[in-house]
Image (cartoon, rainbow, N blue to C red):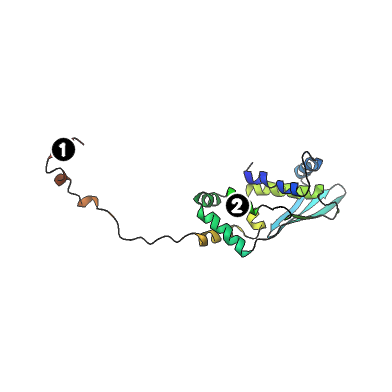
């Protein structure tokens, strides 16, 4: 399990989930039983249908989309660290992108059952974590930037590559090795 898919369920704690909690056990059982349909991630929202005994619930999880200034700062942070850029290019989420995870009060949930943090919400939240395990670019998408947009922003934030100047140094063919040893070829054999 990746660090980012382990980190995602912590957002439920901000909504009042504590451990141990039976909703987690029931949610996992529902996911294993195929109760989640049409899970969709779009900027600012995760939606899915949860088949629960006797009824299907349309669930929505919402987070604020980051504005241009926040994305510029995020792109600059990534561009400044080679390890972060390498992680993204290797389809991994760099740990310095923690700011994309929902903070206190940023996650809003909606379920027609009307119970707030219900098992249906937990199901969608954990089903997203399972998808997120395989595709770390779902979190930036949720915050407003798809994979290509994110990478383009990082490329734009990278410092320009300096132009190549004339070569520095001496070409190997221009070195007078024999003259270096004053014509003493025995000195060459010592090397």
Rendering coords of residue 40 (x, y %):
71, 56
Q: Which residue is mark 1?
A: 187
Helix, strand or loop status at disc 2 = helix
Q: Quadrant of residue 106?
A: bottom right
Helix, strand or loop status at disc 1 = helix
In this rendered view, identify the residue nearer to me: 39 or 10. Answer: 10
Picture layout, residue 183 above or below residue 163: above
* The residue positioned farthest toward the left in the image shown: 183
Mark 2: give few (<14), some (14-19) or many (20+) Cα within 10 Å.
some
User: Mark 2 touching mark 1, by CB under 8 A?
Assistant: no
In this rendered view, identify the residue nearer to me: 110 or 78. Answer: 78
Q: Which residue is mark 2?
A: 97
Q: Is residue 123 left or right of residue 175?
A: right
The Cα–Cα distance between marks 2 and 1, rounded to whole angstroms, is 59 Å
* The residue positioned farthest toward the front in the image shown: 104
Q: Is residue 153 left or right of residue 118?
A: left
């Amino acid at each position: 399990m990746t660090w980012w898919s382990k980190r995602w369920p912590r957002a439920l704690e901000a909504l009042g989930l504590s451990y141990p909690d039976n909703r987690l056990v029931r949610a996992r059982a529902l996911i294993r039983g195929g109760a989640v349909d049409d899970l969709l991630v779009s900027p600012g929202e995760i939606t899915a249908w949860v088949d629960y005994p006797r009824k299907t619930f349309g669930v929505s999880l919402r987070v604020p989309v980051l504005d241009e200034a926040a994305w510029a700062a995020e792109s600059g942070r990534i561009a400044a660290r080679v390890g972060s850029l390498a992680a993204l290019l290797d389809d991994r989420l760099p740990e310095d992108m923690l700011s994309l995870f929902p903070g206190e009060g940023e996650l809003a949930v909606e379920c027609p059952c009307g119970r707030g943090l219900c098992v249906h919400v937990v199901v969608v939240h954990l089903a997203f974590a399972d998808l997120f395990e395989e595709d770390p670019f779902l979190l930036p998408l949720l915050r407003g930037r798809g994979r290509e947009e994110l990478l383009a922003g990082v490329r734009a934030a990278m410092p320009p590559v300096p132009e190549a100047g004339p070569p520095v140094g001496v070409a190997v063919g221009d070195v007078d090795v024999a003259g270096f040893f004053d014509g003493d070829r025995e000195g060459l054999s010592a090397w």
